[in-house]
Amino acid sequence: MRLVLAMTAVLLSAPAIAGAQEEEDYPKLGPAALIFTADTSYLRNAPAPDFWAFSAFVKPQFTTSACSIASVTAAINGIMGQPEWASETIMTQEDLLELTANAEWAALSAEGGDGVTFQQLADFTAEAMAAVGLDGTVTSFQPTMADATNKGQIVEMLSLNELTADDAIMVYFNQGVVTGDWDGPHVALIGAYDATTDRVLILEVDQEWYLPYWTTVDVLLDAMVKPTSDEHGPLEGETGGFVMISAAS
């Protein structure tokens, strides 16, 4: 849900204009995030069903405000899998918006849109499941503080999610807490949970800027409970959490 600062980032990465003061660049990921290619041991040695089921369906958000529809599309596609028949196409973000016929979600996801609240993410996810005929449930968890009780609930959900690709977790979080860059709300898909290292793999839809990365549960919890700043208008004060899709067995 990267709505601002794109021009600043371009200026930082482009050659300095003659006579202009060159600004100092900084690493793509801060110390709280690790690019997934830097440590592939878990993905090579564990079943990691979500990574293999969902990673191929995670596509770039089609606008800078479309992280919610991009994540929900990837989650539903991953659970449903590749279409059976040659005549069937793989559902896109635009396809899902058309199927839901939700004008509010479309407006919030359009270029320059405000982006969704946490409750809207949960509500729109349920609408999307109904629109595509995916039977199942949507469970949301919105922690209020970064404490041991909430961390325990998060670890429980991550551990359950890691057992099968019949469910998916989307995380609503302050992206900058994890990446060390943009300070704003964002939605992405959980790709794996490594209980040994207590790390979570984030499958980014913000692919103009990031590849998938690992972060710890503690950092992700901090990112969930950080309130959105006033620069984000109607999302001011918004905090995040998990929205989990569980397909009917």
Image (cartoon, grey):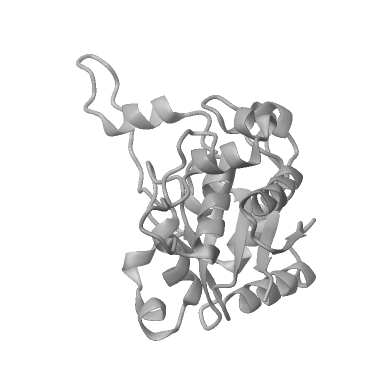
Taking depth in this image into account, of 72 and 172 the one nearest to the observer is 72
> Does residue 54 appear to the left or right of 145 in the view shown?
left
Above-or-below relation of 38 to 113: below
Q: Position of residue 49 (x, y in %)?
A: 48, 76
Give me the residue at 42% from left, 71% from top: 52
Q: Position of residue 80 (x, y in %)?
A: 53, 64
On the rendered image, what quadrant is the N terminus found in? top right
Q: Position of residue 96 (x, y in %)?
A: 56, 43
> Does residue 238 appear to the left or right of 77 in the view shown?
right
Give me the residue at 47% from left, 64% from top: 54
**Is residue 11 something one can see in this rendering?**
yes
Above-or-below relation of 141 to 99: below
On the rendered image, what quadrant is the C terminus found in? bottom right
Give me the residue at 47% from left, 65% from top: 81
Count all numbered tags in the image, as a single digit. 0
Quadrant for residue 23, please give it.
top left
Q: Position of residue 232 (x, y in %)?
A: 65, 30
Above-or-below relation of 215 to 100: below
Give me the residue at 37% from left, 48% from top: 28
Taking depth in this image into account, of 202 and 231 the one nearest to the observer is 202
